[in-house]
Image (spheres, rainbow, N blue to C red):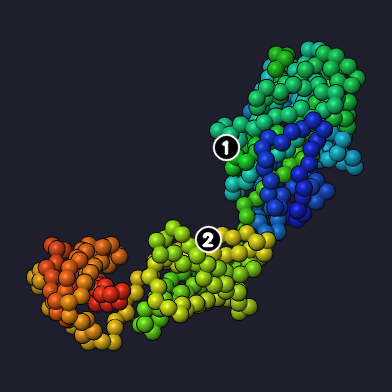
Amino acid sequence: MRAQIQTMICTLFLLQNYQLFSQCSCPTTASLNWNQVTWNDGDFSNDYDFVVPGAQTVNVDFNIHTNASGTFSAYGVSTPYEDGPGASGHWFNTGLDLGVIFDPNSNQGTSPVYIDVSFDQEVTCLKFDISDIDISGTNRRDRVTITGNNGSAIPLLTVVSQDPTVSVSINRADAIGGNSGANNNGGADPGTDNGNIMVDFGSTPITSIRITYSEISGQSNPAGRGIGLFGTFQFCPPTLLPVKLLDFTTKDADRDCAPEIEWNVAEEINLDHYQVAFSADGNNFNFLTTVMPSDDPGIKRYQFEAKEKMEGFFQLSEVALDGTVQALSISHFKPSCFKDFSSVLYPNPVPGREIRWKLGALSDQKIARLEIFDSYGNKVKNINYYQESQTVTTTLPDLPNGLYTIEADVDGERYFERLSIMR
């Protein structure tokens, strides 16, 4: 059975002596509300969609099972069931939760009941409560052990009862028994909160949890035992990114060496605007411009054209409605334009090693620098020399066949040509 749970933004809270495992918070918290979901008496599994504004929808599957023989029923109730005021039974906690009662057959007394919870994607700040981990009487002992991610994640357990009938050690909670609790009978009366703990996984990303519930008194044929689960159950779902980016590219604008930045977007949710930044080295980015989202339906195409020659890295970022900034993509721009002055590179394609490059705008007797880049933008040759004429003559390194870009820098002016090596 699947239901959808609409949740509201919540604030952090404390339950009596409960201390937060970590400074774990999120803008929107998914919470299980038993008034909004259905768990029929005797269902052993259900899954629910947690729908949170601004976050990914998370599907959570709950499954209860055991390898023992016996029956999931007691007090006239088929379990698991929704327990609490107005439900078919009210044996655990003061509010609503999931009641699980198991009455094992003879010689099955110590066999555990497993409660497995799985998430279809990683969640954080997961915390929930378990209530009534106790059995009345001095000879009865319950034990609950909780792990996450197939045993690799261990939560913090905190006793939250005012008159506790349970103690915790690492990820295990044991009933104390004896004369513990408000009524000094080792157990909590129906609808009270004496054997309760809070389970907190903190900031650890969680995809699954297992709760193992068993009796450790050693009795071969004890009477039915039960606990309440998930009166509190909440977590932080993954943030829903405002933008689904399809591509982000840069190219020459009208072959004048000024870059033209383009990107295409399939989805925009809770997006305020885009930011474009530039960096000459790919590390330190400076803001260039803001681009507002389009109202056009379907795939949206955006474009920004710089007003000057720029060579380096462009970064596209999204800014959400809440002000959160997230970098989306980086594109390296290297101009491939040609100058209008007379420029002749020969021979081209190059059959040997020597090339000549006549630059019509190059005056005699200038310091020039040549750089040669492969098709991936990697520099393969760097030459500095005193140029005595308008023709640059140089010997190429032993390069493999392919396409290259040769650049000249003369008095701050940069010139480009495509170079083909075919030997």
Coordinates of residue 54 in the picture (x, y in percent) = 67, 59
Q: Residue at x 47, y 74 (%)?
A: 262
Residue 188: image quadrant is top right
Residue type pointed to by label 2: Ala
Query: Crowding near pointer 2: few (<14 within 10 Å), some, many (20+)?
Result: few
SS class, disc 1: loop
Residue at mark 1: 149
Asked whether 245 or 210 is in front, the reply is 245
Looking at the image, residue 276 lies above or below residue 27: below
Coordinates of residue 394 in the picture (x, y in percent) = 13, 70
Quadrant (top left, top right, bottom left, bottom right) of the C terminus:
bottom left
Q: Residue at x 32, y 79 (%)?
A: 337
Q: Is residue 270 left or right of residue 417?
A: right
Judged from this view, the residue extending furthest toward the front is 365
Q: Residue at x 19, y 65 (%)?
A: 383
The answer to whether any part of residue 349 appears in the image is no
Count of marks placed on residues: 2
Mark 2 and mark 1 lie on one chain; the one further toward the N terminus is: 1
The answer to whether any part of residue 26 appears in the image is yes
Q: Is residue 320 left or right of residue 180?
A: left
Residue type pointed to by label 1: Asn
Coordinates of residue 143 in the picture (x, y in percent) = 71, 22
Looking at the image, residue 18 lies above or below residue 289: above
Real-space CA distance between mark 2 and mark 1, rounded to the nearest whole angstrom = 30 Å
Asked whether 183 or 42 is in front, the reply is 183
Residue at mark 2: 327
Query: Crowding near pointer 1: few (<14 within 10 Å), some, many (20+)?
Result: some
Looking at the image, residue 23 lies above or below residue 3: above
Looking at the image, residue 320 lies above or below residue 74: below
Residue 150: image quadrant is top right
SS class, disc 2: strand
Residue 419: image quadrant is bottom left
